Image (cartoon, rainbow, N blue to C red):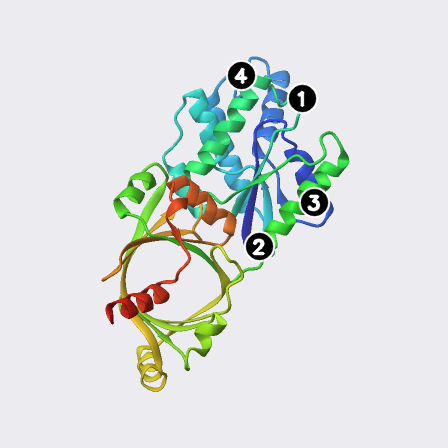
């Protein structure tokens, strides 16, 4: 199931977008906070002496109740849904808690990781602000929480798509926002989207320390590309077998669709070692090279990997791979490495080095 989060500060138009998504047949999950506030305010009116669990009175208890309710809402999503659009998520209370200087259970980060969210659609602020019964924040605090929400989602490494205001105050604004969101959610899958950088690992590790990322393993690869008189290379295609920590992976890649980074169809197949060895004997090898790869993954995106690569004779590189161009560019900005981007693939760099060494 693909889980898309709709979020932003108070009065950014979330309700209208969620209703717009529902109107075109999309599955949605409601926000927990509004429901809790309504229930607690009703209890205060109906039960003498009852002190409601409200954010302005007891933020700690309110956030704990929100987490419990939000988790329940997300677990109750119909199993048949291939994609769902969530009105906020388990991440949002972190921003409110940090601004309110109240603690949250450490388990929240494990729950966020297990939720396996796909992307975040962050709605830009509308040019007007409207307070409501459940929205008691003044405009100044609304701006602070809006900025803090983005900061938290960014710190956790989410793939954040900013949704602008297209037509302020008009019904067409909701339609345009919904169209953008659906188009992004329906983007073509099974593509290799990545960018490489020739940059020091120490520099990148220092920047990674500012974000919620974890080391997810180190690969020791032996890569071999096979070709027939450079036919595949000239077409921009790849047929590769990679042996990594005792496992064998056959990869087929199509032509690149972008002049600025790798964006091509990719299909991977785990194969037995016997088949790998057989193919190696009967297919003509084009280029081979070893690679040591140290992998890091952001808490907020299980489909994104930041790899610190070392290729003997060539040196240190970094590769950012994700499911969207947007996420690659976000991490490039987060790490401050745009100026180190290279267009050559590793096989091409290996070929170039062999040619240079032959003179």
> How far apart, in angstroms, are the residues tagged by discs 3 and 4?
35 Å
Upstream in sequence: badge 4 or badge 2: 4
> How far apart, in angstroms, are the residues tagged by discs 4 and 2?
37 Å
Q: Is residue 191 visible?
A: no
- Indicate which label's residue lies in the foreground, 3 or 2: 3
Determine the residue positioned at 60% across, 33% down.
124
189, above or below 62, in the image: below
Q: Viewer-proximal residue, 51 or 277?
A: 277
The extreme front residue here reads 359
160, above or below 189, in the image: above
Upstream in sequence: badge 2 or badge 1: 2
Q: Position of residue 171 (x, y in %)?
A: 76, 35
Q: Where is residue 309 in the image (x, y as percent from the top left)?
A: 30, 56
Circle 4 residue: 51
Q: Position of residue 123 (x, y in %)?
A: 60, 35
> How far apart, in angstroms, are the residues tagged by discs 3 and 2?
17 Å
258, above or below 85, in the image: below
SS at mark 2? loop
SS at mark 3? helix
Q: Viewer-proximal residue, 264 or 141?
A: 264
Left or right of 328, for residue 242: left
Circle 3 residue: 22
- Report crowding for label 2: few under 14, some 14 to 19, many 20 or more residues within 10 A (C-alpha): few
- Report crowding for label 4: few under 14, some 14 to 19, many 20 or more residues within 10 A (C-alpha): some
The extreme right residue here reads 171
Determine the residue positioned at 27% across, 47% down.
201
- Indicate which label's residue lies in the foreground, 1 or 4: 1
Q: Do the residues labelled 1 and 3 touch (CB within 8 Å)?
A: no
Circle 2 residue: 79
Determine the residue positioned at 54% across, 28% down.
146
Left or right of 87, for residue 358: left
- Indicate which label's residue lies in the foreground, 4 or 2: 2
């Amino acid at each position: 199931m693909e889980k898309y989060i709709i979020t932003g500060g108070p009065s950014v138009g979330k309700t209208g977008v969620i209703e717009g998504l529902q109107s075109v047949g999309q599955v949605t999950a409601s926000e927990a906070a509004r429901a809790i506030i309504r229930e607690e305010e009703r209890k205060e009116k109906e039960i003498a002496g009852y002190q409601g669990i409200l954010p302005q009175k007891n933020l700690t208890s309110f956030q704990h109740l929100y987490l419990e309710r939000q988790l329940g809402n997300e677990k109750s999503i119909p199993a048949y849904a291939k994609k769902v659009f969530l009105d906020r998520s388990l991440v949002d209370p972190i921003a409110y808690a940090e601004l309110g200087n109240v603690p949250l259970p450490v388990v929240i980060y494990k729950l966020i990781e297990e939720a396996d969210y796909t992307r975040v659609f962050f709605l830009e602020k509308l040019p007007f602000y409207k307070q409501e019964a459940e929205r008691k924040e003044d405009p100044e605090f609304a701006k602070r929480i809006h900025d803090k929400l983005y900061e938290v989602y960014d710190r956790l490494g989410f793939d954040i798509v900013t949704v602008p205001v297209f037509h302020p105050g008009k019904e067409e604004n909701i339609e345009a926002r919904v169209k953008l969101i659906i188009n992004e959610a329906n983007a073509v899958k099974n593509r290799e989207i990545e960018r490489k950088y020739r940059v020091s690992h120490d520099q990148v590790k220092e920047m990674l320390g500012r974000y919620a990322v974890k080391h997810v393993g180190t690969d020791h690869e032996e890569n071999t590309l096979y070709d027939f008189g450079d036919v595949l290379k000239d077409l921009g295609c790849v047929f590769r077998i990679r042996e990594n920590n005792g496992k064998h992976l056959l990869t087929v890649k199509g032509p690149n669709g972008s002049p600025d980074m790798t964006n091509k169809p990719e299909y991977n197949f785990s194969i037995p070692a016997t088949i790998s060895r057989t193919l190696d004997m009967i297919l003509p090898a084009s280029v081979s090279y070893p690679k040591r790869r140290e992998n890091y993954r952001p808490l907020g995106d299980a489909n994104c990997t930041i790899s610190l690569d070392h290729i003997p004779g060539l040196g240190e590189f970094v590769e950012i791979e994700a499911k969207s161009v947007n996420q690659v560019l976000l991490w490039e900005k987060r790490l401050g490495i745009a100026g180190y981007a290279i267009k050559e693939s590793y096989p091409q760099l290996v070929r170039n080095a062999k040619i240079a060494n032959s003179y």
